[in-house]
Amino acid sequence: MKSDIKVLIGNVFLLALLCSCTGRIENTLTLVQADPLKKIFKEQLYFEETPDTIAVARGETASFQLVFRSLYPVTGLSFDAGALEMDGSSAIEAGLKAFVGYVYVPERFMSTLPSDKRQTTVSGYYPDPLWETETTDVASMSNQPIWIDYRIPDDAEAGVYTAEITVTGIADGKKFKLEKTVSAKVYDVTLPEQTLYVDNWINPYPQELRRMNRGELFPLYSDKYWELNKAIANMMRDYGQNVYRVFPLQDGNWSICGETADGLPEYDFNFRYFDESVEFYMKEGGLKLITGYHLCQRLTPGWYSHPGIMVPLVSERDTVMKIMPFESPEAKNFLDQYIPAFDRHLKEKGWDDIYLQYLADETADGEYEQTYLRIADYIKNLAPDLKIIDALHRTPGIARKIDVPVCILDRLHLQYGDLYKDMIESGKNVWFYTCMEPLGNYANRFIEQPLIQTRILHWINYRYGVKGYLHWGLNSWRNDEIYGENIDWGNNPAGDCWIIYPDYGKVHPSIRLEAMRDGINDYALLKMIGEKNPEKAQEFAAETVLDFDRYDNDIYDLRQRRTRMLEYLSGNTQND
């Protein structure tokens, strides 16, 4: 109620100001620079101008956010982003140039566990998508953020660069032009090749991608299929993704060619589409690791239902996948043929060192865990070199058994001292994941959270020696109102299901994806410091990540900390 009153008073004040304004139209317009880690809400009345020089290494992205506001309605708002330039140096052209868009999120789709970091808005509109459009219209007394990225080349000369941003449009029937100068300091530091493993699960199938094709479906593995997947893979490569999930079984890589002596199916495996998918992501997505879709699903609904094997069988009309109990003859017959054949194929292609196999998603404890361990043993006996990865909750037996345990963040917190710390220190490849959980003050990528907490996800990676990050929802566009005003986010907290937005033939990033990319780069800087001085790197990380669920969320502190990190790496400090 108090927020509503404040907005009303502010609007009354602005209306009075509008009535009194005379002379140049520019007197009724504002253009301020805001930190790109600040979410700008539509009804926000006050902005603290932050004309800071962005500190970056070569290979990073310098991002700028400007906020435009007018007392009059504006049509045809557009902007031109000049190159970042420094005397005696070549220009750095702008890359992404976008208007920050808003999505309407009803209160019922916000997370239910209270958080003292949660951001709320009176209007219900939250900034998120980055629309790369030429122009937009802006209502009176409404904010329109502008977003500009400059990717710093690896050969850029160190120094301070400036760029001129020009904003034009029509307000009250009059043309206007506003200008703003932004600056970035490039340090004598170059990002190394990325070592942090990052996987946001892509849903590559036509049912999902039709939203990039005006709602029209298209054949699997058609030219359109690869065209649209390329748009996604290229974007994710540019934002730091290097792990891609593929579908060795579901992609038509098998057929039933006869019967065994026991009357069970005899299989033929060709792996054609599996190979095409892997080679595609190697070329288009910067692939470093391949993960294979789950071999198991729960036999019946319910968290503790036993995992069963997905077995190809023939029905009266066609070939289907059926979930069968692990102990069944059908399941073991399939595994006995598939696992050795697939393992041989991986080794023939030279992919065995970069392939990880999912068995069952979000494993449960109790009898489920015991069944899972029997399945894992069986598969390891058939292919000892096949590496297993899975998302875990509270299953220490599975975490010890498999090659890459991926623990949900709050469980990693609870089990770190008793389980994961020793694993990590012994060299085990441990990851963590977030999804619709954890809630509360834990870092995640929900719409309601400050952007800095999304960026901090990868500071957590470094702080605790966790080598990878997983999220299930890159593009699970579950309905056709993705970019409408009343989005049905399902039962998941807003922002959980996707972090990119579909458009015809392409996708748009979000400010959350930008924060994640910058967090990946923060991790790389910490790794560089760690190679020189591990204690110093942990000192920097611990200033941001106080504990698994406690962080320094102050944007100014983070900016100052990063500057100190760059100073340290460039040799401009004696503090070793």
Image (cartoon, grey):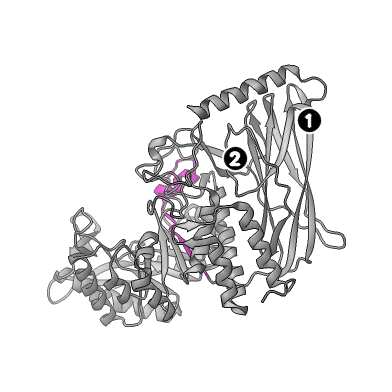
Residue at 45%, 53% in the rendered image: 444
Whether residue 430 is visible here, answered yes or no, is yes
Instruction: Identify the magenta region.
Output: 196-218
Helix, strand, or loop for circle 2?
loop
- Asked whether residue 520 is drawn in magenta, I would say no
In the rendered structure, the answer to whether residue 274 lies left or right of residue 77 reads left
Task: Point out which mark residue 469 bears.
Answer: none
The type of residue carrying mark 2 is: Ile
**Looking at this view, is 41 or 548 the one in front?**
548
The residue where tag 1 is placed is 176
* Foreground of the two, 370 or 440: 440
Farthest residue in the top direction? 19
Left or right side of 384 for 409: right
Residue under label 2:
40
From what the image shows, is residue 514 above or below residue 338? above
The amino acid type, in three-letter code, at marker 1 is Phe
The front one of 192 and 323 is: 192
Residue 485 spot, x, y in % from top left: 48, 33
Q: Residues within 10 Å of mark 1 (few under 14, many from 20)?
A: some
Asked where in the image residue 193 lies, by quadrant, the reply is: bottom right
Report x, y in % for residue 249: 33, 65
Which of the two discs, 1 and 2, sits closer to the camera? 2
At which x and y percent is residue 536?
A: 60, 73
